């Protein structure tokens, strides 16, 4: 038996999982339309690569990865692209975001699939590219592009691969049912990942002990492999990446580091399944298992849904009664977000649609005063002091918030769950995190601006000094000129006539003598010739190495320099005559 | 279809702040009954006066502060303060004393600081100390426990008690007397054994001191029930009682004439158990982390013993708790727990490392 570490804190909410496990994975009729947001993952939005009106096949790429952290999106069924525009998506603010709309043709015709059943012959790079092109992202809820996670891990020595099948949130059973029905494929997926990572020494599947059937299924297929199924007592939030790593290995992930930094890669079991499909079957990530549950739904069960299926389509198929429903939640009751509209589509990270009744999840009572009872700090999995964070958050004391490690909060919601005064603690923390991030960004901008300003000050000062120097030089030359002319000696008087005289005199001296003019022109000529030399040399370099653009540019500057030299020579001859 | 938008988590555990407060009141019932049995009607009269004046004062001040009255009254915190104060004040104390102490607790110590959750000091203890300093004679007149009354004397009946409390009539001779802690405070060179033999408070006691020992046991039971219900953690009370026991063991002095009394006597006399389980555990005015509460409890235990043994008051829980309240923010500063993924805990005022 492997040793299990007991993570601090945690709560035991009623798990409400049985009702959605009565029947197995179901399938829905094809919806009329599919809506695919370009951002379904952590990172930059994907870039559309189809046009409105185009016919697409199932599995065809609709949008490609657009930056170093991004993931492509594929058509979940065949049909036509009927719109590329902003649509409401699942977001706490209820906002809209760019989406591709597919009107299904009902044929569900696949694009030609390129499968890779003998993945053991493939290189790690090939496999990573396959996974990246299939648009596989973390299916546990966070949605980090898997290929990038594996890419980062490949650069470090990984000795432990952890498959997260904890599923600690109440109500959700998507991982549970997937393991029960398709454990063999998950194990295949794990083997692909293991091969890709250079066969890590330890491979663990972490499962909470409230899933005996899933555990049995895993044990059946892990028998004779080096994959170990580790079960541990049910407690929320054991499925948090940091918590699971501690429970299984006793190691704490240092604040601000990635699991790969301590030799660990952690992936969800659903992700392992998606990787198997991507590599062995050549199918991109176009469907997932989503739990539909809650008393406002007549039927509670798991469905293999196409990504992009509107939530309303799912609800319609399951005797949903809106009057019964207190709120509509995407994700679990602890960390899920409430949806403003049921028209939003299911995306790659949609683990669950929860439609609870008013008795199941009643409206919140108004918050009472915090009495610092400390129940929140008893349950905090990160050993924070939520009650202090709350006070500092209300006081907007960013310094104290940071010294109390606000940014180590994983927003699991355990503190709010136990708070007897019903204070929406997590909401306060989210808002404070946003405030602090914004003010840090502002500070960075201000620092850049200050640097620029200081640089400008220095530049202006230099220019001022140069001007001052010139002025001084001019003054000196004027004085010399005065001394040279005999009338200047008498012009020290203070009468108006004297002043006018002096001014006239200055005017005369300002009109430089031919010698001075010549000297100036000679200097200009010298400078122009030097510039011409330089430009010609640069032109030479560019013709050897540079682009056509650079060549034309240099050619132009050589021409300009030549012109200047000619002009100056001409004027010089004029002055000399 | 449109739906209501709510921030996660959705759903809460069922326990409410008002229920916690009610449980605390409920847990004082065993102690309340024992005290009433031992000292007569006076305690219940205190309870009624204190509760009514607390509710009245709270209502008034909430109105002045333009706060919803019903909403805040329903959190039962005013009642808890009133009950704790009533348990601490001497039975048959004049009505105005109870009113002054309660109103001071609610208005000055609680609401002027911002109401429930914002008071740095335990309101009941502030009220108690104000009364103790302002009216020392009334506050130190205690009733003799029932089993020590002379054969022809009995505790005043309800009507007589009411007349004592409201009309200022004096109780019959022999109904008031010293407490066990008083005896040790005013010990004139007697050995502990001699005190125990000479005084019925000890000679007829089961283990600590007639009257107070069973009241303390009752509060201990109530406190353990709250501990079991996870209303508070063990850290504060155990640290306080542990330190009190340790100190009285260290200075027990073999029962000489200088001895401030045995550990058992200290643990089961005065307000020890009431203080440990109902006052030290007040979350609002105590330190916040478990480690902080250990230090906070130990500090109070230490102060209780120091004042009892060498100060000028026979009991000291109220003073010790207020001094502990003073120290709580300081303790908090140095007892922030180590967060997951950090090598060590930081002090609460630590600054982010600037790059």
Image (cartoon, coloured by chain):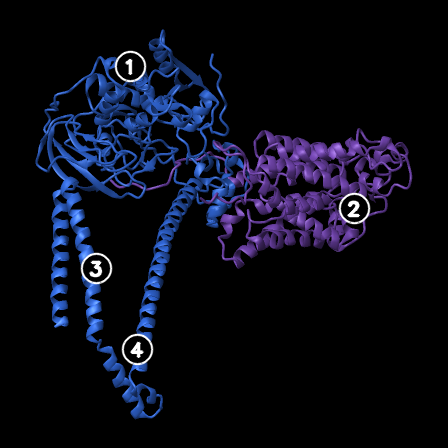
Chain colours: A blue, B purple
Q: Indicate the secondary structure of the residue bearing disc 4.
A: helix
Residue A558, image x and y in percent?
14, 53
Q: Nearer the viewer, residue A23 or A539?
A: A539
Which residue position is annotated with label 4?
A478
Q: Which chain carries label 4?
A: A
Which residue position is annotated with label 1?
A188
Instruction: Nearest to the eye among marks 3 and 1: give it.
Output: 3
Q: Which residue is drawn at 39% across and 23% down?
A: A264
Residue B143, image x and y in percent?
79, 43
Which residue position is annotated with label 3?
A527
Q: Which of marks 3 and 1 is nearer the N terminus?
A: 1
Residue A530 in view, yes or no: yes
Q: Neighbour class for label 1 at 10 Å: few (<14), some, many (≥20)?
A: some
Quarter occupied by residue A524: bottom left
Q: Nearer the viewer, residue A472 or B350?
A: A472
Q: Earlier in the sequence, mark 4 or mark 3?
A: 4
């Amino acid at each position: 038996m492997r040793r299990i570490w007991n993570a601090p804190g945690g709560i035991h909410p009623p798990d409400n999982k049985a009702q959605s496990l009565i029947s197995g994975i179901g399938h829905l009729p094809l919806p009329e339309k599919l809506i695919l947001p370009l951002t379904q993952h952590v990172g930059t939005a994907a870039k559309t690569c189809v046009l409105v009106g185009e016919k697409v096949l199932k599995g065809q790429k609709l949008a490609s990865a657009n930056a170093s952290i991004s993931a492509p999106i594929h058509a979940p069924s065949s049909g036509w692209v009927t719109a590329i525009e902003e649509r409401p998506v699942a977001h706490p603010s209820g906002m809209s975001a760019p989406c591709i709309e597919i009107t299904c043709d009902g044929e569900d015709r696949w694009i030609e699939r390129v499968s890779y059943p003998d993945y053991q012959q493939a290189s790690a790079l090939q496999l990573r590219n396959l996974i990246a092109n299939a648009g596989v992202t973390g299916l546990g809820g966070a949605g980090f592009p898997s290929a990038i996670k594996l890419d980062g891990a490949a650069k470090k020595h990984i000795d432990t691969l952890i498959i997260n099948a904890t599923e600690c949130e109440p109500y959700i059973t998507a991982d549970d049912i997937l393991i029960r029905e398709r454990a063999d494929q998950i194990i295949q997926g794990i083997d692909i990942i293991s091969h890709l990572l250079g066969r890590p020494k330890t491979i663990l599947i972490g499962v909470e002990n409230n899933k005996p059937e899933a555990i049995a299924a895993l044990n059946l297929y892990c028998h004779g492999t080096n994959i170990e199924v580790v079960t541990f007592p049910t407690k929320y939030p054991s499925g948090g990446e940091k918590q699971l790593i501690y429970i299984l290995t006793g190691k704490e992930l240092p604040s601000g580091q990635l699991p790969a930094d301590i030799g660990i890669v952690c992936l969800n079991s659903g992700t392992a399944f998606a990787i198997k499909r991507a590599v062995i079957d050549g199918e991109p990530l176009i469907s997932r298992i989503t739990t539909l549950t809650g008393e406002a739904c007549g039927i509670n069960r798991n469905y293999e849904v196409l990504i992009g299926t509107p939530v309303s389509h799912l609800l319609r198929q399951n005797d949903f009664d809106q009057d019964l429903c207190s709120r509509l939640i995407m994700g679990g009751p602890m960390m899920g977000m409430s949806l403003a509209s049921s028209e939003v589509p299911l995306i790659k990270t949609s683990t669950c649609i929860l439609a609870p009744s008013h008795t199941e999840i009643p409206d919140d009572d108004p918050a009472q005063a915090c009495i610092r009872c400390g129940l929140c700090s008893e349950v905090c999995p990160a050993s924070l002091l939520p009650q202090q964070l709350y006070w500092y958050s209300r006081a907007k004391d960013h310094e104290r918030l940071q010294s109390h490690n606000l940014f180590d909060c994983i927003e699991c919601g355990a503190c709010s769950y136990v708070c007897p005064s019903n204070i929406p603690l997590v909401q306060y923390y989210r808002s404070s995190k946003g405030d602090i991030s914004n003010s840090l960004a502002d500070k960075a901008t201000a620092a850049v601006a200050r640097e620029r300003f200081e640089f400008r000050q220095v530049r202006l000062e230099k220019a001022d000094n140069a001007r001052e120097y010139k002025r001084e030089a001019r003054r000196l030359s004027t004085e010399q000129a005065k001394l040279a002319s005999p009338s200047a000696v008498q012009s020290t008087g203070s009468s108006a006539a004297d002043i006018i005289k002096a001014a006239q005199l200055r005017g005369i001296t300002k009109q430089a003598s031919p010698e001075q003019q010549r000297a100036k022109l000679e200097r200009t000529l010298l400078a122009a010739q030097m510039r011409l030399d330089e430009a010609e040399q640069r032109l030479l370099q560019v013709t050897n190495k540079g682009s056509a653009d650079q060549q034309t540019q240099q050619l132009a500057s050589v021409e300009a320099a030549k012109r200047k030299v000619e002009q100056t020579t001409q004027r010089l001859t004029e002055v000399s005559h | 279809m449109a739906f209501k938008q709510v921030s996660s988590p959705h759903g809460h555990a069922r326990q409410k702040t008002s229920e916690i407060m009610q449980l605390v009141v409920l847990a004082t019932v065993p102690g309340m009954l024992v005290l009433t049995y031992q000292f007569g009607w006076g305690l219940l009269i205190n309870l009624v006066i204190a509760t009514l004046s607390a509710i009245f004062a709270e209502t008034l001040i909430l109105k002045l502060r333009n706060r919803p009255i019903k909403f805040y009254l329903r959190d039962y915190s005013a009642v808890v303060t009133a009950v704790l104060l009533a348990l601490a004040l001497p039975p048959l104390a004049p009505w105005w004393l109870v009113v002054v102490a309660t109103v001071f607790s609610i208005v000055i110590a609680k609401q002027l600081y911002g109401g429930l959750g914002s008071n740095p000091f335990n309101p009941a203890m502030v009220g108690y100390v104000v009364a103790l300093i302002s009216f020392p004679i009334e506050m130190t007149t205690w009733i003799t426990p029932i089993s020590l009354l002379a054969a022809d004397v009995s505790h005043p009946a309800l009507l007589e008690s009411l007349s004592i409390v409201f009309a200022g009539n004096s109780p019959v001779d022999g109904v008031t007397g010293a407490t066990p802690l008083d005896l040790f405070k005013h010990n004139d060179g007697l050995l502990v054994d001699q005190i125990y033999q000479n005084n019925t408070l000890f000679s007829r006691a089961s283990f600590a001191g007639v009257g107070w020992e069973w009241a303390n046991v009752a509060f201990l039971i109530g406190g353990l029930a709250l501990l079991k219900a996870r209303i508070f953690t063990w850290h504060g009370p155990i640290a306080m009682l542990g330190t009190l026991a340790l100190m009285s063991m260290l200075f027990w002095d073999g029962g000489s004439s200088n001895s401030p009394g045995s550990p058992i006597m200290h643990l089961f006399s005065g307000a020890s158990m009431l203080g440990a389980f109902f006052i030290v555990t007040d979350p609002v005015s105590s330190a916040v982390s478990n480690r902080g509460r250990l230090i906070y409890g130990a500090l109070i235990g230490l102060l209780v013993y120091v004042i009892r043994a060498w100060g000028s008051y026979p009991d000291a829980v109220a003073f010790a708790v207020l001094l502990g309240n003073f120290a709580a923010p300081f303790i908090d500063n140095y007892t922030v727990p180590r967060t997951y993924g950090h090598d060590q805990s930081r002090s609460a005022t630590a600054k982010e490392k600037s790059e």
